[in-house]
Amino acid sequence: MDVLITDPEASVRADLAFTREVRQTRPGVRIIVLAPAASSDEVIAAIRAHVFACYSAPFDHLEIAGMVMQALDQPGWEDGIQIVSGLSNWFTLSVSSRPLTAERLITFMTQLRSDLPDSERDLLIAAFREMLINAMEHGAGFDARKVVEVTAAKTARAIVDHFRDPGNGFSKASLTHVAQTPAMEDVAASAEERAARELRPGGFGMLIARQVADELVYNESGNEVILLKYIDKMSKT
């Protein structure tokens, strides 16, 4: 048994108790938790318990099937998500720089932001994903031995996501390969620059984040970024 999917009618608490029992005999099993509902505290508990992914109803069966396939494709699986500090309104994670780890973290973040309107949540999660992948790719070179530190906080007025990668950062002058606006000429220019540098197609992560965020603030060296989204503005859209 490599992957175990829990009963979708069981609570997260029951699933985590079951997880502890299974791990006594099968410590390497990847467990995907399905539950009728999942509070923020329960999602944090699921991350602490090192489950592979967590979903609550209504379920997207194609998404779950895709995650199962990824779980089956990881014979030497290591969790890669460690809680440094965990409160439902402020938590910090140490995340190994692997594409799979990023996708797993997105499933948890989607659950944690389930109190937002679907359209707003989807946009915010898209921006979160782009910033996380950018940190892993450009700051850590997708080296699983290196980690990205992620902090997610929610106040009465704002959602705050902070990313810190282990890289040397960047200067704005070096970003000619990144589209600065959605204008066709900017997108075309960045595509040409990426081709000249023999980089993969892309470069839209920061553009997406800038379009979604109310504020996007980098530190001096460029290896830390804060994404701010104001809740009062979200409620008006």
Image (cartoon, rainbow, N blue to C red):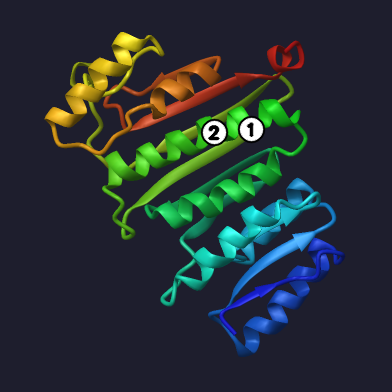
* Quarter in which the N terminus is drawn: bottom right
Residue at the spot 68% in from the left edge and 83% down from the top edge: 22
Mark 1 and 2 residues: CB-CB less than 8 Å, in contact?
Answer: yes
Q: Amino acid at mark 1?
A: Asp
Q: State the image quarter where residue 23 is shown.
A: bottom right
Q: Position of residue 124 (x, y in %)?
A: 59, 29
Is residue 166 visible to us here?
no
* Element at label 1: helix
Of all residues, the one furthest to the left in this rendering is 196
Q: Residues within 10 Å of mark 2 (few under 14, many from 20)?
A: some
Left or right of 19 in this view: 216:
left
User: Is 167 rendered above or below residue 229?
Assistant: below
Left or right of 8 in this view: 104:
left
Q: Amino acid at mark 2?
A: Ala
Structural distance between the alpha carbons of marks 1 and 2: 6 Å
Identify the disc placed on residue 122. Answer: 1
> Mark 2 highlights which residue?
126
Q: Position of residue 181 (x, y in %)?
A: 38, 12
Residue at the spot 70% in from the left edge and 19% down from the top edge: 231
Q: How many tags in the picture? A: 2
User: Is 182 rendered above or below residue 209?
Assistant: above
Viewer-side residue, 215 vs 125: 125
Residue at the spot 75% in from the left edge and 62% down from the top edge: 34
Q: Position of residue 182 (x, y in %)?
A: 41, 13
Is residue 230 visible to us here?
yes
